[in-house]
Amino acid sequence: MRKTFCRFGCVSLLALAGIALSFTAGAQQVPAQIEAPANEQLLLQVHAKGDQVYTCKEGVTEFAWTLKAPDAQLFDKDGKAFGKHFAGPSWEASDGSRVTGKAVANAPSPDADSIPWLLVNIISHNGRGVLWSATTVQRINTKGGKAPASGCDAAHAGQEVRVPYSADYLFYAPK
């Protein structure tokens, strides 16, 4: 029976069954520079809660906090565990499917104390689960996560800091 369902598109049937339905993106308008391509449709939306991990590194002229990786748990519209978000940037669903992307555009968050909103093109896939057909990811509705404005100097070189954040990730697939 499972082969029969997957033959017709696991992702679509999961969405129809209510397993991976998207939830409201919020009232914020998505800036044009991070809009999903017109030939794609929303596949699913998840909420992330975790940390942006920064490392104090020496740059050309000064020390600065540099993003090492996100470290967040992902939740579906009902607040149930969906998967995780980590270095890559990568997203992994509980079914084992995983995508890795490359940021191609950003826009400032409407919340000045939050990390920017992003458009990410997916560059690799692993597994044939719910994320298998995703080609683009948007990060919107960010809260927190910005690197500290100070505290990175020669005395703190190599030190890591974790900054709490949350965001919504919208996954898109071809129509």
Image (spheres, grey):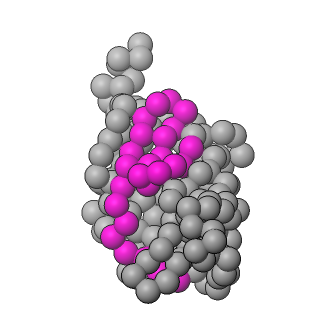
User: 39 or 118, which lies in front?
Assistant: 118
Q: Is residue 151 above or below residue 25?
A: below
Question: Which residue lies at the image location 56% right of the left edge and 44% below the top edge?
Answer: 84
Q: Residue 159: percent from the left, percent from the top?
A: 61, 61
Q: Residue 156: percent from the left, percent from the top?
A: 63, 68
Numbered range of the magenta stretch: 84-108
**Left or right: 131, with 117 as reference point:** left
Q: Is residue 92 magenta?
A: yes
Question: Which residue lies at the image location 45% right of the left edge and 70% below the top edge?
Answer: 118
Q: Is residue 110 above or below residue 162?
A: below
Q: Main secondary structure of the magenta part?
A: strand
Q: Residue 48: percent from the left, percent from the top?
A: 62, 54
Q: Quadrant of the C terminus?
A: bottom left
Label total for image: 0
Q: Is residue 5 magenta?
A: no
**Left or right: 76, with 39 as reference point:** right
Q: From where the camera sits, is residue 26 visible?
A: no
Q: Residue 120: percent from the left, percent from the top?
A: 38, 63
Q: Is residue 20 above or below residue 22?
A: above
User: 162 or 40, which lies in front?
Assistant: 162
Furthest-front residue in this view: 155
Furthest-top residue in this view: 1
> Which quadrant holds residue 146?
bottom right
Q: Quadrant of the N terminus?
A: top left
Question: Which residue lies at the image location 51% right of the left edge and 49% below the top edge?
Answer: 86
Q: From where the camera sits, is residue 19 visible?
A: yes
User: 21 or 100, which lies in front?
Assistant: 100
Question: Which residue lies at the image location 49% right of the left edge and 83% below the top edge?
Answer: 62
**Left or right: 173, with 162 as reference point:** left
